[in-house]
Image: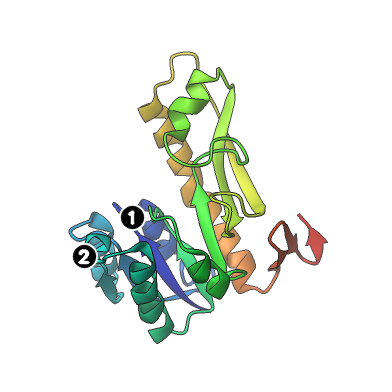
Amino acid sequence: MNGVVLISGGGSNLQSIIDNAEKINLSIQCVVSNRPDVYGLERSAKANIPSCILDHKLFKSRRDFDQALMSVIDEHQPDIVILAGFMRILTDEFINKYQGRMLNIHPSLLPKYPGLNTHQQAIDASDTLHGASVHFVTKTLDGGPVIAQKKVKINPEESAETLAAKVLKQEHVLYPEVIHWYTQGRLKLLDATTATLDGQVI
């Protein structure tokens, strides 16, 4: 399947997808960043994958940015749109267009801790487990149906930085696996709250 990957930063999840692309039946057609000069763009260049910078600061409104982003994505006619550390809240129009073929990875055990600063929130709540979730993107921020999760233990001396590093390692395993389910045709979104794997509700 053809895919477009959206990034905003260093692109370590992008790298894990690039490294596994052949194995997971994914052809990355383009990497799009909403920020210039991020390391994720260097990763795509090293892999000879086309990239595009759409600096959100140059657009008057969120809708204008999303319109431009849709134009770039549609040039590549992707079967799947992959958010890999893409730090933008998307408009309903954008989500409606790609819903059912757009995935995101989030650094918490959703529905716990949507949004930012998830690692510190888990520590502050005295949680013993934390992790990462892959979900379909819907209009609810980090609220689409969760497809799969990986868990890590929170040690008593844990900092947000050490916890983030542990979770990121699991993200690099989890995301390519879930993308592969999609490219195999095994993973589907039924509606805004329900996803299925091999025909079974997750």
Question: Label 2: how many residues lie within 10 Å, few (<14), some (14-19) or many (20+)?
Answer: few
Question: Label 1: how many residues lie within 10 Å, few (<14), some (14-19) or many (20+)?
Answer: many
Residue picked out by circle 1: 11
Q: Which residue lies furthest to the front in this view?
A: 60
Determine whether, in the image, residue 81 is placed left or right of residue 128.
left
Residue depicted at 44% across the width and 42% down the height: 168
Q: Which of 92 and 11 is in front in this view?
A: 92
Q: What residue type is labelled 2?
A: Leu
Q: Which residue lies furthest to the left in this view?
A: 37
State which tag comes first along the sequence, 2 or 1.
1
Q: What residue type is labelled 1?
A: Gly
On the image, the x and y values in percent for residue 29 come to 39, 78
Asked whether disc 2 touches disc 1, contact meaning CB atoms under 8 Å apart, the reply is no
Residue depicted at 60% across the width and 49% down the height: 143
Determine whether, in the image, residue 102 is placed left or right of residue 146.
left
Figure colour scheme: rainbow
The correct choice, above or below, for 187 with respect to 156 in the image is below
On the image, the x and y values in percent for residue 144 come to 62, 54
Using the image, tell me which numbered label, if any, was put on residue 124.
none
Q: Helix or strand or loop: what does disc 2 sit on? A: helix
Q: Is residue 88 visible?
A: yes
Image-quadrant location for residue 56? bottom left
Q: Nearer the viewer, residue 140 or 1?
A: 140
Residue picked out by circle 2: 58
The correct choice, above or below, for 132 with respect to 9 in the image is above
On the image, the x and y values in percent for residue 64 come to 34, 71
Q: Which residue lies furthest to the top in this view?
A: 156
Which quarter of the rendered picture does the C terminus lie within?
bottom right
